[in-house]
Structure formats: structure tokens, C-alpha cells
Amino acid sequence: MSGHSKWATIKHKKATTDARRGKAFTKLLKEITVATRMGGSDPKGNPRLRTAILEARGSSVPNDTIERAVKKGSGDLGGATFEELTYEGYGPGGVAILIEAATDNRNRTAGEVRHLLTKHGGNLSEAGAVSWMFDRCGYFAIEKGTQSEDAFMEFGLELGVDDITTDGEAFEIFTSVEDFLRVQEELLRRKIQTLVGELSMIPKNYMELARDKVRSAMRLMEALEDHDDVQKVWANFDLDLADLDS
């Protein structure tokens, strides 16, 4: 994983998400509901739910709203039942794309996701077509300047994480799924602020795209992320923000 930073892509995606604050709130609450349904309502034993709650609180979602989302997921409150689905496909230049969605109507969502991929020069593929190109793992990005590079490296080695990187604009930590909660708790205990903390799908290999293809791929990812039912989008291309700013 070393040498391939996710932060440039995440930084760009965060900027677009912040411009759609209301929609971002809806997605955060839906993630809390789905995480509760999948793994239970106790954040201590459900790292996905704990992460979703921390992210929601970091985005100033009120606690009572978070509690209602948990109750919906546990069945204590009525409402729509969301089904978690993963779509696989290809985008401009042959980039592999994984799309995680939560929907109450799988036929509607599948048709709309297929339409977005086709509209932006991609196509929807069958299950397993691209998922083998990704590994699920824990991912944390930490702002540089909060500690020295040597201190960060020592901290990463002490925790026994899978990988650490210091290139680019942020320090990055990669963990196994099993170690994600342990590392998250240690970061909280040491009051180390994270820019990102999530269970992520990390490409095993990255591909380079021509500048025009990068722009097209980002437009596709933004269109997918803007869809109400899409929760996360992962892709296996390197991103240089200069390609978007020039």
C-alpha cells in the first residue's frame, strides 16, 4: 500500500460533500441505521456503528437524531427498511469502481446506478468483476503538524498496524478489519484527531489515467456519491489534484 495515498481523493470528495451538507446528514444517518441492523446497537461491539456515530457527531448531527437512527436500525422505531447492496463496474479508462448502497428499492437503485455509469462512460458489471481488486481494511488519515514524522512512525510501529505512510499531505494508517476498533480507541485515548477514520476498500494496485480521463472519472464518482442511495464509492486510480485544478 505504501506510496499510494488516499487522502488526495478523500480531500476532494470531502469538499464536494460539504457543499451538500443536508444530503451528507441523510447518508450519515442511513449508515447508522444500516450498521445497527447489521451488527447490533452497541457501538462497543460494532466498530462500523461506532465509526458512523463518531463521523455523525463530527459533522454536528444532534445526539437525539443519532439515537433515533440507531432505534430504527434495531427495530425499536418504524420506518423504511434499508437493504445493503454492492455494485461493481468500470469507469472511464477502465478504472474499477465499487459502489456501496443502502436502499429500500433495489430495482430502482440498480437501474439508476447503471444509468449513471453509462452516462459517464462506464458500465455496470456482474458481481465479482472488480471486487477482487480491493481489500477491506481500516484506514485513518491524520493531519501533519499534529506530531513529528518520527513520533508518528514510532506510534504506528507500537500499535502494530499493517502499514503506515508519511508521504503527501497527511499521515496515513492502514489496519486489518479486526484491528480497526483497537486502533481507533487508541487514537481517541491519546486525543489524536483524525481527518478520516473508516472501514475502507483499498485497491491492491492503482492505475494511472490520462488527465481527461481523471476529470471524467471524478465526475462519475461525484455523480454516484450524489445519488441518495449511494453511501460509498471506491475506485483504483491515482489522483493528482493538479489534474483537476489546471
Image (tube, helix red, strand yellow):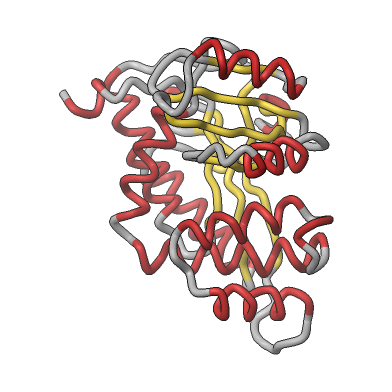
Q: Residue at x 50, y 23 (%)?
A: 171
Query: Relative to 128, is 35 above or below?
Result: below
| Image quarter of residue 170 | top left
Q: Which residue is drawn at 63% across and 47% down?
A: 87
Classify the position of the N terminus by image quarter.
top right
Q: Which residue is drawn at 33% across and 60% down?
A: 20
Nearest to the observer: residue 108 or residue 175: 175
- Identity of the residue furthest to the left in this view: 246
The picture places residue 240, in percent across and down from the top left corner, at: 33, 20
The picture places residue 183, in percent across and down from the top left corner, at: 71, 35
The picture places residue 78, in percent across and down from the top left corner, at: 70, 89
Nearest to the observer: residue 148 or residue 57: 148
Nearest to the observer: residue 169 or residue 216: 169
Q: In this view, does 54 lie to the left or right of 237?
A: right
Query: Relative to 175, is 17 above or below?
Result: below
The picture places residue 166, in percent across and down from the top left corner, at: 50, 14
Q: Which residue is drawn at 55% across and 48% down?
A: 232
Q: In this view, does 45 lie to the left or right of 112?
A: right
Query: Relative to 11, is 236 above or below?
Result: above
Query: Relative to 42, is 157 above or below?
Result: above
Q: How many labels does the image show?
A: 0
Q: In this view, does 56 lie to the left or right of 13?
A: right
Classify the position of the C terminus by image quarter.
top left
| Image quarter of residue 152 | top right
Q: In this view, does 20 lie to the left or right of 157?
A: left
Nearest to the observer: residue 51 or residue 26: 51
